[in-house]
Amino acid sequence: MRALVVSDIHGNLHALEAVLKVARSCSGPGFDELWNLGDVVGYGARPNEVIDTLRSTPASRVIHVRGNHDRVCCGLSSSQGFNPVAAQAANWTRQHLRPENLDWLRALPMGPVPAGDGVLCVHGSPLHEDQYIASMRDAWIPLQRMPVDIAFFGHTHLQGAFSCRAEFWSEDPPAYVHGSGSQVQHFTLPLPVGARYLINPGGVGQPRDGDWRAAFAIYDQTERQVTFFRTPYDVQAAQAAIREARLPERLAARLTTGR
Ligand code: ZN
């Protein structure tokens, strides 16, 4: 079984379409299941189209987890605590979502959502849906306390993994080959039994690790490994959509730098 794991799409249809195209064309069977770790909307200018695409993507099983932007954009939470740009984007998104897509967002489950076979899907952390895991310091307690050996998480828009085995721990960012920053790249991390892993597929629609390419991962349950991917997409088109919608300029500009 292979699961396509995506997170933090944030209304960026151009990035999501590139991800689906690459994921379907990977060597081997592509993917069987689709796991979405949340923040489908907010920031980007195509929230309805992103939800429609996710809902119509063929997969033998689909897992969704709600993100904090999903909650705010559908009115389940207030935008208190959001910075002004995020709050403005959430308001715009709420005004532009079709009623059935607002209902779909409101029905998304809070993580952790079990994916079976000792794996969890969460937005922030296995311990709290809004917790950020950006460093080993953040990852240490969730790694100890989570009830499974593998959890997929998002929220930080930073691709990579944290792992521990007994008292040994490591950070495992994907080691892509330098000099191919405008191509599709992938990096496979084996997940041996006996260790615990927190794995972030990265942000599809608004990466923040300095790489502008859309990020995602494929989890291969049978081979017990995860493959991280980066794919170029039509950034200019995503930026034009943001500017046309009169969303804050910062949301368009940051897509070029991946920061
Ligand atoms: Zn996010």
Image: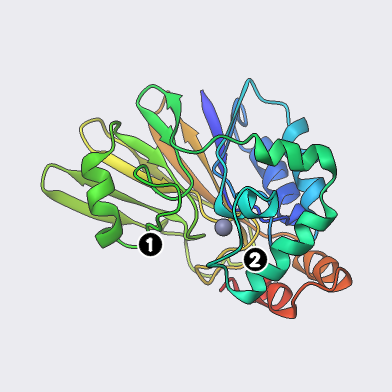
Q: Mark 2 points at which residue?
A: 182
Q: Mark 1 points at which residue?
A: 134
Q: Which of 201 and 81 is in front in this view?
A: 81
Say which residue appears at 21% left-offset and 43% top-offset: 144
CA gap, disc 1 to disc 2?
25 Å
Query: Which amino acid, by three-letter code, is at mark 1?
Result: Ala
Q: Residue 13 at x, y = what percent?
A: 77, 53
Q: How many neighbours does mark 2 have within 10 angstroms: few (below 14), some (14-19), or many (20 or more)?
A: few
Say which residue appears at 72% left-offset and 43% top-offset: 21
Q: Is residue 115 above or below residue 5?
A: above
Q: Residue 152 at x, y = what percent?
A: 43, 41
Side of 76 relative to 177 (left or right): right
Give the quadrant of residue 179: bottom right
Image quadrant occupied by the C terminus: bottom right
Q: Residue 257 at x, y = what percent?
A: 61, 76
Give the quadrant of residue 241: bottom right
Question: Is the CB atom of the residue marked by disc 1 within 8 angstroms of ligand 1's nearest atom?
Answer: no
Give whichever of discs 1 and 2 has the lower sequence position.
1
